[in-house]
Amino acid sequence: MIKRISLLFYILMFIVSGLQSQDLEVPEVVITKRKTKYVLLPATAYSPETGVTAGFLSAMFFDLAKGDTLTRMSQIALLGVITTKSQISVGTDFTIFTPKEKYRIEGRAEYQRNVDRNFGRGNNANGLVQKIDPETGAVKDEFNFLEFTSNQIDFRLSGMYRFKDGLFGGPAYHLNSASKVEPFGNRIVVGNNALISETQIEARLSGVGFGITYDTRDNLNNAKSGYFTQMRHLFYDDVFGSTHSFYNLYLDHRFYKRIYKEQSAAFRILSDQRFSKKDLPLYGLSSIGGNDFVRGYFNGTYRNNHVLGFETEYRIPLQQDPTAKFWVFWKRLAIHLFASGAQVMDTWQDFDLTAFRATIGFGGRYVVNFNQRINLRFDVGYGLHKGATANGRAWGVYFFLGEAF
């Protein structure tokens, strides 16, 4: 099965590479002067994973094509925040287009002093952890996760060549390092719970491979029409400095369509597969939850070698007016409704239609920048699975800049 999947991926890469020899159909270029734009905002946000955050967000939008409107604006974002959970995060995201979009360079670099939760592995977060009073030794609370702190570095980089309009392909690299892992608070794993106690956290994952991106979205930040499909095949091995050897097949497919006037629908399906002969560390596993994938569950509530999930969202702009002043809030509002579901598996033989962990939710949007379609996002997600927390179902409130997908 694994060999067939790998063969299919490389056949697809071969077909796409063959397109390079064909003449590109280049529509008529329209030259319009586009100035470099800057956005500087206070990065106030909230999620169950971080608590309240405070810091800054800076973004720059620039034109490397010197007015060629067929080439999308490049963008670089910088973020630096601290949180009420004693977390620190500094990072950058970037997507750069060269003239005529001949090359697309994108990546991410982030450092975190993080507080996270180890729910163990599997589609049921039913491990038991007790919080102990350090003075009396009495049990104060019971949880289904073990909190810990760690230093994390995450770095991604891909450089892709345009084979034809919207279709890019090229090499990719990923590094994730988790170090200085320490328990957070006086909590102990109850019994011989291998789901939590035997899941390794500290590791360095370094992988090299190839990626393909098909992108016809009308906007990178908040698309109303078009497709986005991204496939990656990465090999992690000690040759590249990795402490674990495995390979990853990743597929993220999104579809956006205008429904009525400025209203639009967005759909996403995600498949993240990890193949290894040995157990993988916590951050080497595929996961569900967080502010941008299956909102409502804590990020990493469900982890395993494989994940398959979907999301759908309906976006309803209200009385939006690009000429409105920033403080005229009623002319910058939108309402979003969303639903999602996903499941994790140890092997594909464990796939079960009844095992999807579903969420539903709603949110509000406030337009920060009409030209680049940058929104402040407020979402409330409700997890429908009864075993997501020690007390039953989970829910999350998220306040971020930018769309979930």
Image (cartoon, rainbow, N blue to C red):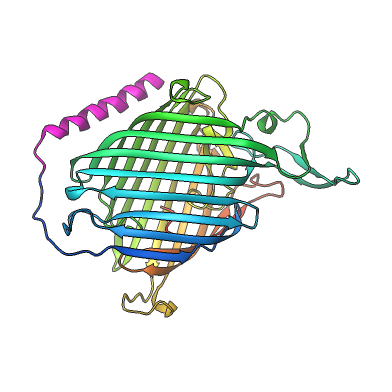
The residue drawn where x is 70% and y is 37% is 127
Quarter of the image with the N terminus in it: top left
The x and y percentages for residue 400 are 49, 60
Q: Which residue is nearer to you in this view: 49 or 381?
A: 49
Q: Main secondary structure of the magenta part?
A: helix
Residue drawn at x 57%, y 24% is 279
Residue 368: x and y, percent? 40, 69
Q: Is residue 57 magenta?
A: no
Q: Is residue 10 magenta?
A: yes
One can see residue 224 in this view: no
Residue 173, relative to residue 134: is it above or below? above
Q: In this view of the protein, which residue sits in the foreground, 18 or 255? A: 18
Residue 209 falls left or right of residue 154: left
The residue closer to the viewer here, 339 or 95, is 95
Across and down, in percent, residue 189 comes to 75, 35
Please determine whether, in this image, residue 244 is positioned above or below residue 51.
Answer: above
Taking the image as shown, residue 9 lies to the left or right of residue 375, namely: left
Residue at the image point whose x is 32% and y is 43% from the top: 229
The answer to which image quadrant residue 303 occupies is top right
> Which span of residues is magenta-colored?
1-24
Quadrant housing residue 334: bottom left
Task: Name the side, left or right, on which 375 lies relative to 48.
Answer: left
* Residue 261, x across and y down, in percent: 28, 69
